[in-house]
């Protein structure tokens, strides 16, 4: 049995209870830290080479100390091992492989032996436990709004005391021009919590749209109860914001409920966001209707949707252009974020010019490719035909129903359209071969000769070049960027520009993700075929080598 150590039992237990309560950690962790500290102090006295153990009873406060030695046939380490003869003296009946507990003498001066080192062990253990508790407490709270006190401002980042932990509001997650004063209370959204050697890293935000949504949920009971739902939100922090709301109860007006009596509810949110103006907009499943609402207070004349490109063309009266665009493009930018689409704003005059230009270009294309007169080409465009493929592959009955057309004329137009497409395909094939693009690429599904020309110009000329691409690199659509133009009678305003961000090589052709995956996998197929062919060849070579060896 290990011998008890002379120590103040009540004092040890009191310290353990006090630390556990103050740091809000398990008492067992504090007891374990104390045991490690005592073991470290004992090794400093009896020798670091010894395997010394300590046990502190969490109920009675009894403290015991002992050394453990192993019984072996031949001793290699005289501090941790004993031979059988010596073991019999310590504990009769011991055999090889047993462990003997060798009691150590009492340490009346334990408190004075390496006290500083022992204290560090305890503090480190407690700190580790406290950090783990903090991480466990906050790790599942991302998305919550929390209140804290500003502790300091370091390099523009605001450090917030959250009570039992600290969070940081990075510079890019603060509301612009908001003054952060030490000691002030602040509310913020918990964005994410990461484990770190120095404790949990709690990242907060006051600029995220989700923060505004959570504030509305606190101020509007109908949102908290789920009767009203915020379907979309967009912010220009500190300046302006838009939210799209819908009511699941037809008797409740979602906009009125969010505004509140005399604007009390929305004003509470506005004050928290440092005067940020908030437009509350009724959400609609109809994209065109939602876009019209999102561009308030501007009046919209017409909305043209391009779902394939996620672009929306909005036509407004001339006197509404600056209002629709907003200061520095703010209104249309927030509306684009709210609808998750690229919105292009143009006036009635600009829209008319664009339609006239497109009409003339398409008419000229049909006139040249189909070898028809201007009247016939314009009639096709007026009926909604925009490309040769539409004329070539539309049903004959639909083409023949156009006023002034008959079945014979429809057949002739379809024949000419198909011939024109063949001419274009031949021209693209010739261009593709001049670029040095392998014929093997032409066998891959979904790829046209025109696409192969684009691939060739991008330096993708064989199966390996194409196989090395990821699907996104091949088909990701390019996003158009806005630009500013100088209007004739006013300051610069926003209008679309055909500048494009990075996208897939074939992003302009509207290929789906499934088609892109099929193209990439078809290009990689020869890799697996080569591996399969190589395996039998290797087996054959091995057999031949074995036969040659046996013949010798």
Image (cartoon, rainbow, N blue to C red):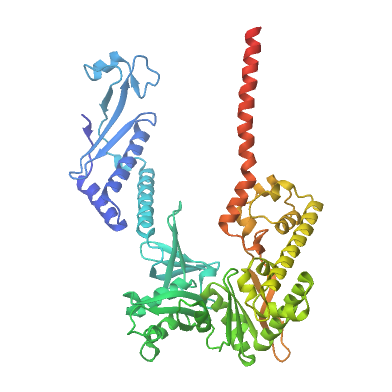
227 lies left or right of 6 = right
- The percent coordinates of residue 263 (x first, y second) are 40, 89
- The percent coordinates of residue 253 (x first, y second) are 37, 85
Q: Name the residue furthest right.
A: 434
Residue 512, above or below 86: below
- The percent coordinates of residue 449 (x first, y second) are 72, 56
| Quadrant, the N terminus | top left
208 lies left or right of 52 = right
Q: Name the residue furthest top.
A: 552
477 lies left or right of 10 = right
492 or 156, nearer to the observer: 492
Residue 18 found in image quarter: bottom left
522 or 427, nearer to the observer: 427
109 or 379, nearer to the observer: 379
- Residue at the (65%, 59%) spot, across then down: 504
Q: Can you see residue 184?
A: no
Q: Can you see residue 72?
A: yes
Residue 281, above or below 418: below
72 lies left or right of 193 = left
- Residue at the (32%, 85%) spot, across then down: 251
- The percent coordinates of residue 158 (x first, y second) are 49, 68
Residue 37 found in image quarter: top left
């Amino acid at each position: 049995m290990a011998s008890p150590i002379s120590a103040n039992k009540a004092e040890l237990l009191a310290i353990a209870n006090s630390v556990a309560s103050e740091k809000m950690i398990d008492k067992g962790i504090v007891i374990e830290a104390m045991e490690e500290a005592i073991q470290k102090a004992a090794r400093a006295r009896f020798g670091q080479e010894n395997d010394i153990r300590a046990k502190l009873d969490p109920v009675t406060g009894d403290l015991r100390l002992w050394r453990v030695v192993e019984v072996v046939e031949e001793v290699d380490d005289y501090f941790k091992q004993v031979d059988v003869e010596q073991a019999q003296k310590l504990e009769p009946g011991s055999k090889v492989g047993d462990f003997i507990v060798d009691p150590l003498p009492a340490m009346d001066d334990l408190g004075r032996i390496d006290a500083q080192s022992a204290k560090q062990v305890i503090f480190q253990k407690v700190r580790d436990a406290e950090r783990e508790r903090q991480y466990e407490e906050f790790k599942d709270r991302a998305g919550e709004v929390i209140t804290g006190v500003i502790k300091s401002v370091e390099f523009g980042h605001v450090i917030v005391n959250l009570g039992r932990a600290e969070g940081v509001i990075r510079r890019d997650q603060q509301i612009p021009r908001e003054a952060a004063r030490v000691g002030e209370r602040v509310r913020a959204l918990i964005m994410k919590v990461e484990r770190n050697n120095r404790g949990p890293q709690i990242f907060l935000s006051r600029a995220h749209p989700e923060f505004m949504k959570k504030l509305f949920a606190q101020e509007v009971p109908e949102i908290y109860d789920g009767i009203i739902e915020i379907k979309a939100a967009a912010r220009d922090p500190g300046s302006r914001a838009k939210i799209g709301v819908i009511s699941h109860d037809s008797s409740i007006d979602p906009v009125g409920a969010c505004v509140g009596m005399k604007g009390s509810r929305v004003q509470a949110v506005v004050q928290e966001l440092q005067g940020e103006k908030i437009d509350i907009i009724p959400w609609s499943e109809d994209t065109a209707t939602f876009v019209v609402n999102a561009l308030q207070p501007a009046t919209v004349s017409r909305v043209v949707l391009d779902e394939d490109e996620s672009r929306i063309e909005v036509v407004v009266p001339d006197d509404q252009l600056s209002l629709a665009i907003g200061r520095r493009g703010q209104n249309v930018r927030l509306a684009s974020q709210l609808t998750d689409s690229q919105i292009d704003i143009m006036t009635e005059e600009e829209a008319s010019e664009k339609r006239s230009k497109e009409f003339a270009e398409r008419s000229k294309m049909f006139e040249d490719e189909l070898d028809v007169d201007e009247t016939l080409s314009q009639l096709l465009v007026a009926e909604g035909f925009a490309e040769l493929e539409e004329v070539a592959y539309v049903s004959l009955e639909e083409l023949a129903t156009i006023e002034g057309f008959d079945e014979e004329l429809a057949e002739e137009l379809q024949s000419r359209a198909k011939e024109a497409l063949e001419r274009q395909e031949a021209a693209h094939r010739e261009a593709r071969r001049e670029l040095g693009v392998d014929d093997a690429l032409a066998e891959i599904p979904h790829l046209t000769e025109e696409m192969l020309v684009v691939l060739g110009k991008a330096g993708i000329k064989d199966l390996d070049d194409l196989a090395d691409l990821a699907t996104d690199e091949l088909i990701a659509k390019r996003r158009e960027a806005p630009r500013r133009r100088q209007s004739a009678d006013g300051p610069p305003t926003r209008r679309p520009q055909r500048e494009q961000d990075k996208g897939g090589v074939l992003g302009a052709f509207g290929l789906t993700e499934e088609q892109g995956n099929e193209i990439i996998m078809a290009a990689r197929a020869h890799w697996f075929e080569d591996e399969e062919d190589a395996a039998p060849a290797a087996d054959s070579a091995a057999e031949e080598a074995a036969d040659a060896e046996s013949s010798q």
